[in-house]
Image: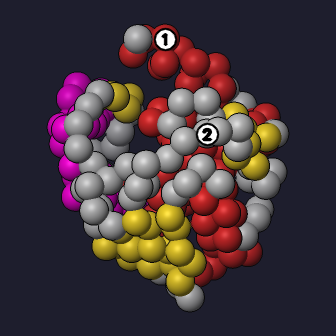
């Protein structure tokens, strides 16, 4: 239900910028170009989707976290290669979200997510020393009170200021 403005969002990009926005819009957000960036606004409802993420596979952990909060199931494919990144991201996401009561099933080339209520109940989200899993846990923590992350500092490998920027964003939103 909130909004974020991403400064410097490119009008044209060799990266998969359009696919990133399309995926978020299909999940219920709106994306509006603004002076100097892009504003993404949540509707308050996340929709489940089926998507081939092979060109934006780095988004998978965060999209899986969002999909756990959707109004219908999601299936993400084209991401079997994520088994060989810093961790086996597919197995790690299924395991860690499952520890909070979530329902994520591994597929040969992806994941299937069936939303259901989750709770921390003392569970700790293990980062598996993988920066993208820390980002997924941060998103999960927006909806599941009490989420704690084991070795969250691993996000510093690629985004040293993530923790501080996340804290600032949370302070502004409250």
| Mark 1 lies on residue | 171
Judge the density around disc 1: few (<14), some (14-19), many (≥20) Cα neighbours within 10 Å. Answer: few
Q: Is residue 48 visible?
A: yes
Which residue is located at x 53 percent, y 74 percent?
A: 105
Which residue is located at x 45 percent, y 78 percent?
A: 77
Q: Is residue 71 left or right of residue 153?
A: left
Q: CA distance from mark 1 to mark 2?
A: 22 Å
Labels 1 & 2 near each other (Cβ < 8 A): no
Q: Give how far across and how far down residue 55 sits, in percent.
A: 45, 70
Q: Is residue 124 above or below residue 79?
A: above
Provide the secondary structure element on which disc 2 rests: loop
The answer to which of 129 and 120 lies nearer the viewer is 120
Provide the secondary structure element on which disc 1 rests: helix
Residue 71 highlighted magenta (yes or no): no
Q: What segment carries the magenta color?
A: 15-43
N-term-proximal mark, 1 vs 2: 2
């Amino acid at each position: 239900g909130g909004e974020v403005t991403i400064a410097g969002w490119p009008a044209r990009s060799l990266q998969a910028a359009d696919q990133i926005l399309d995926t978020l819009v299909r999940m219920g957000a709106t994306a509006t170009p603004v002076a100097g960036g892009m504003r993404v606004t949540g509707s308050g409802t996340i929709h489940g989707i089926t998507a081939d993420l092979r060109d934006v596979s780095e988004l998978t952990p965060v999209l899986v976290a969002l999909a756990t909060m959707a109004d219908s199931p999601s299936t993400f494919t084209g991401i079997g290669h994520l088994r060989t990144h810093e961790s086996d991201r597919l197995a790690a996401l299924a395991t860690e979200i499952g520890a909070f009561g979530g329902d994520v099933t591994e597929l040969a080339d992806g994941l299937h997510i069936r939303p259901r209520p989750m709770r921390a109940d003392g569970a700790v989200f293990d980062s598996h020393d993988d920066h993208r899993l820390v980002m997924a846990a941060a998103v999960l923590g927006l909806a599941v009170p009490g989420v704690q992350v084991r070795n969250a500092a691993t996000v510093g490998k690629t985004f040293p200021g993530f923790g501080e920027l996340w804290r600032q964003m949370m302070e502004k939103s409250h």
